[in-house]
Amino acid sequence: MDSKYIFSVIGIALLLLILIAINQLIKSVKRINLTLDKIAQKIGVADPAGDDLIKSLIVDCKKIEAIKRYRELTGAGLKEAADYVEKLTQSTIP
């Protein structure tokens, strides 16, 4: 057999294994997020999506203050908070 053919088959097999592992990780993360949401509801953690202050700050074009508020409510990092506010901005402002 040609060595290029063997390497191609091995490469495809490894790619398939990686894709399967990624799929399993995605499913695990979804399960974990559902569990965390249930726990948050049980203990009364505020849902930032329902926070009117964040929405009003976005409408007033005060993204930095909205990011700070999100971080106060969730303890999230700067990148996560900025991504959340950006996503909310796109759905709030036409």
Image: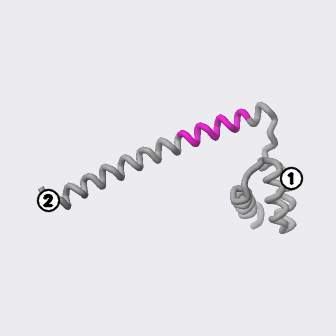
Q: Position of residue 68 (x, y in %)?
A: 82, 58
Q: Nearer the viewer, mark 2 or mark 1?
A: 2
12 sits to left or right of 88: left
Residue 93 colored magenta?
no
Residue 35 colored magenta?
yes
Q: Position of residue 79 (x, y in %)?
A: 69, 59
17 sits to left or right of 60: left
47 sits to left or right of 80: right
The residue beneath circle 2 is 2
| Residue visible at 51% across and 43% down in the picture | 25
C-alpha gap between disc 2 and disc 1: 65 Å
In the drawing, what numbered circle is on residue 25?
A: none
| Residue visible at 20% across and 61% down in the picture | 4
- The amino acid marked with disc number 2 is Asp
Taking 36 as reference, is 87 above or below it? below
Is the image coloured rainbow, by chain, by secondary structure, or in one colour? one colour
Residue in the foreground of this view, choosing between 40 and 11: 11
Marks 2 and 1, the one that precedes in the sequence: 2
80 sits to left or right of 59: left
The residue beneath circle 1 is 52
- Looking at the rendering, the stretch of residues picked out in magenta corresponds to 28-39
